[in-house]
Structures are given as structure tokens and as C-alpha cells.
């Protein structure tokens, strides 16, 4: 007999977590609470409620929470204040969602007096680490059930067979048979893994992509967009103020329309293996480019360079699941302190997969001085003779070494 009486399951209603729901009931003989997070995945979430009810979950134990604004405001935007990119390409669309899901899951566990939490991440993936580091960071003594590390249903085909045996409805079977892609979607991105993507030499099917047209099929006319920032966050598009979630939704629509944000990546997973995934992050791609543009005129040179030095470490913290760790919080405080002057606007051009910065300005915080930077007569604003002494001082050590090398 299990010592677990009630468990909160992170439940999407898809193949994996639907099988897990039934498996938890049969294996642990415990009460299950389902939690479904609306992070802007663009799908109707009520079917998840209906599936849970079909398996005897009490209505009061079914949680479907709209977390879109919190997700963008408190997780996505803070991440992009650091211009965060993992391994030079990945905009961390999956990684940044996990700490919020873990946070809300623990809140529900406390609310319902559950003694355990469960997730659908596999034993090969990063998400098991991200979820569980979040759980333990927020509720140190919580019990964690990770079915993929316990059961023998270790393939999509076995999951489908289990679902069929137990009459679990499964959506999105691939038209050619076989298992569907493993997909994750939220307001920041949609990812695709599995099937023939497991062969890194195979090109992704065009029909796989959901949010974006191919650059070849994008409009022949460019579209201009004015992006307004306050303290490093986007607050308005084309002069219209919007909430964080609305900003990202609108940028996804515009970016997808112009073929922006597709990525085919082989990443180094936390558990040690290489894994291939395809990603669509149209809005995030625009945010990153626009944010760097406004920082270029509002941040001090050394502050900007310090941020660039710290960013890979910050990205690794998020990728590896350390959002709730003290070092991430300390680093976030430093990053946020740099953003007080990041105010102004950027004009960008969207064209066939490209995000092109065409102008930028800050009326209150611009460090760009046209009188000093001009190639015309600056009226004495900059004394070019001063550069000689600067160069000689920086060259001194090399001149000394050069004399030795001449002997």
C-alpha cells in the first residue's frame, strides 16, 4: 500500500499525461489532482477537464489556470532583459515555462493538502530536472513521482497501446501512422521533437511548422514596426500600449506572418546527451533584436559588456532548471538594475525571415551624442589629439615586449 494519499499532476490532457493520470490511479491507488496551465499554447483547455472527469477526478480537484500574463511579465520579460540565448541560438521557450508550472503546482499541493507532485517529463530529458529543482526549491520535503523513471512504457508506441487498452482518447496521431511529434507550446514558442527529427540529417517537414510560414512564402513587402520600451520591457507596439501577454501574442502573429523565428537545433542536454529539436519563436526573436537595439544607445559600454559576459551563465541557469536558486535571483537583481535607463523606441523592419533594425531613439536616456560622433566639424566637442596618448599607453606593454623580441 502506497504512503501517498494525494498527488498533484501537471496535466496537459495530451498522450503522456493522460496515460500518467490512469497509471497513478492504478499504481499508487491515490487521489489525483490535475493542474493544467494556460501559458498561451493556443489550444482549447476544456477537453483536459473533460478527460479528467472521465477518469473520476473530482471537479474540485481539477485546476485550469490562466497564467499568461504572469508568464510573460514575471518570467519571459525578465529573461529577455538579459538578452538570453542558450548555446548561441536557443531562446529557452520550454525552459522558462517550467519554473512557473512548478510554482503553481506547489501552491496547489499546499492548497489541497497533497503530499506529492508528478510530471510527465522523461528520464532522458531536461524537464525532469527543471520541474524537480523547482519543486524542491519551493517545498523541500515534497514527494515527487516521475513515472518515466518507474514504468516500462518507454516509447510513444507503447504509450499509444496503453491508451488504447484503457480507452484513453489521444489527439494528433500522425497521418502516416506512428507516434505524433512530442510538442510543447506556450506564448513564447512551440517546439517539436521525435519521429524522423531524431535523425539530425533529415530535414523537417514543412507541414510540421505551426506558427510561421517559410521565408520563401512570406509577403514580398516588408512591414515596419515601432517597439516602445520602459525599463527594458516592451510596453507598446506602433503607439498602442499593451499588456505583456498581448505584446508577445501580437509579435508572434507578425513574426510568423513574415517567416521569422524558425530554428533547427541540436542542443546539449543537461543529462549529457545531444538532442535535436525544431522551434518556432517569432515574438521572442523580435524582442531580442529590438531590446539589444535600445540598449545600444542607453547602456554604458562597460555595463553592456558585463551583461554580455554574464548572459551565457544566466542562460545556463535557466536551461538547467535553477530559476529558483539564489544565484539566479542575485544575478536577476543585477540585470534589472541595468534596465532603469533602457527607455525609448526602436523601429524594425520584418522581411522574409529577417528582423532588421532601421532606427532607435531615447528622449530621456540616450548616451549617443551626435556632436561627438559626427564625422563633420564637431566644434571642439572631441579633441582628436587626445587619442594619441591613449594609444601610446595601451601600446606600452607591447612595445616593451617587441623590443625584447628584436634582440
Image (tube, helix red, strand yellow):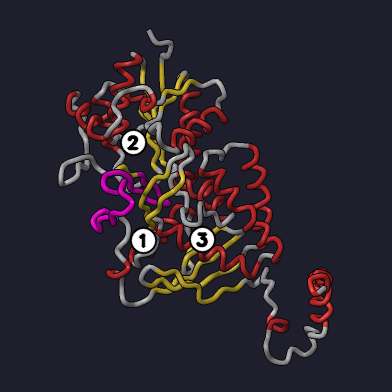
Residue 69 % position (x, y): 47, 47
Q: Nearer the viewer, mark 1 or mark 3?
A: 3
Q: Residue at x 39, y 74 (%)?
A: 223
The answer to whether mark 3 and mark 2 are in CB contact below 8 A is: no
Closer to the N terminus: mark 3 or mark 2?
2
Judged left or right of residue 376, residue 87 is left
Residue 131 % position (x, y): 47, 33
**Is residue 104 in sight in this rendering?**
no
Q: Nearer the viewer, mark 3 or mark 2?
A: 3
Magenta region, residue range: 184-208
**Is residue 222 in sight in this rendering?**
yes
Residue 17: quadrant of the picture: top left
Closer to the N terminus: mark 1 or mark 3?
1
**Number of callouts in the render?**
3
* SS for callout 3: helix
Judged left or right of residue 42, residue 88 is right
Query: In the depicted view, which residue is nearer to us: 70 or 263?
Result: 263
Q: Residue at x 64, y 72 (%)?
A: 363
Residue, far bottom: 377
Q: On the rendered image, what quadrant is the C terminus found in?
A: bottom right
Residue 253: quadrant of the picture: bottom left
Query: In the depicted view, which residue is nearer to us: 336 or 401?
Result: 401
Residue 231 % position (x, y): 62, 58
Query: Which residue is denoted by mark 1 in the rendering?
Result: 253
Circle number at residue 288: 3
* SS for callout 2: loop
Residues under labels 3 and 2: Cα distance?
29 Å
Closer to the N terminus: mark 1 or mark 2?
2
Query: Which residue is denoted by mark 2 in the rendering?
Result: 12
Judged left or right of residue 110, residue 22 is left
Amino acid at each position: 500500500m502506497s504512503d501517498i494519499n494525494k498527488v498533484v499532476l501537471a496535466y496537459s490532457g495530451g498522450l503522456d499525461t493522460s496515460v500518467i493520470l490512469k497509471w497513478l490511479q492504478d499504481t499508487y491507488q491515490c487521489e489525483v489532482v490535475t493542474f493544467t496551465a494556460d501559458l498561451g499554447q493556443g489550444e482549447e483547455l476544456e477537453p483536459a477537464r473533460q478527460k479528467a472527469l472521465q477518469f473520476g477526478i473530482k471537479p474540485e480537484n481539477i485546476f485550469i489556470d490562466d497564467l499568461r500574463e504572469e508568464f510573460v511579465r514575471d518570467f519571459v520579460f525578465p529573461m529577455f532583459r538579459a538578452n538570453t540565448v542558450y548555446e548561441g541560438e536557443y531562446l529557452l521557450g520550454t525552459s522558462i515555462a517550467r519554473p512557473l508550472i512548478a510554482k503553481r503546482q506547489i501552491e496547489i499541493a499546499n492548497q489541497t493538502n497533497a503530499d506529492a507532485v508528478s510530471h510527465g517529463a522523461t528520464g532522458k530529458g531536461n524537464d525532469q530536472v527543471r520541474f524537480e529543482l523547482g519543486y524542491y526549491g519551493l517545498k523541500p520535503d515534497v514527494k515527487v513521482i516521475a513515472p518515466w523513471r518507474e514504468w516500462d512504457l518507454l516509447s510513444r508506441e507503447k504509450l499509444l497501446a496503453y491508451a488504447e487498452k484503457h480507452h484513453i482518447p489521444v489527439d494528433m496521431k500522425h497521418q502516416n501512422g506512428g507516434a505524433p511529434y512530442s510538442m510543447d507550446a506556450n506564448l513564447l514558442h512551440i517546439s517539436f521533437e521525435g519521429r524522423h527529427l531524431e535523425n539530425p540529417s533529415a530535414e523537417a517537414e514543412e507541414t510540421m511548422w505551426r506558427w510561421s510560414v517559410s521565408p520563401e512564402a512570406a509577403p514580398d513587402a516588408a512591414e515596419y514596426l515601432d517597439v516602445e520600451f520602459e525599463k527594458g520591457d516592451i510596453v507598446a507596439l506602433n503607439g498602442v500600449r499593451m499588456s505583456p501577454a498581448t505584446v508577445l501574442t501580437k509579435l508572434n502573429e507578425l513574426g510568423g506572418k513574415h517567416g521569422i523565428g524558425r530554428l533547427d537545433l541540436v542542443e546539449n542536454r543537461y543529462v549529457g546527451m545531444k538532442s535535436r529539436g525544431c522551434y518556432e519563436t517569432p515574438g521572442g526573436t523580435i524582442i531580442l533584436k529590438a531590446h539589444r537595439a535600445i540598449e545600444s544607445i542607453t547602456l554604458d559600454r562597460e555595463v553592456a559588456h558585463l551583461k554580455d559576459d554574464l548572459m551565457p551563465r544566466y542562460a545556463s541557469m535557466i536551461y538547467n532548471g535553477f530559476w529558483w536558486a539564489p544565484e539566479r535571483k542575485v544575478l536577476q537583481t543585477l540585470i534589472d538594475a541595468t534596465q532603469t535607463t533602457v527607455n525609448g523606441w526602436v523601429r524594425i523592419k520584418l522581411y522574409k525571415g529577417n528582423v532588421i533594425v532601421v532606427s532607435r531613439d531615447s528622449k530621456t536616456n540616450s548616451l549617443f551624442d551626435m556632436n561627438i560622433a559626427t564625422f563633420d566639424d564637431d566644434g571642439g566637442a572631441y579633441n582628436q589629439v587626445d587619442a594619441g596618448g591613449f594609444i601610446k599607453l595601451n601600446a606600452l606593454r607591447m612595445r616593451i615586449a617587441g623590443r625584447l623580441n628584436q634582440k
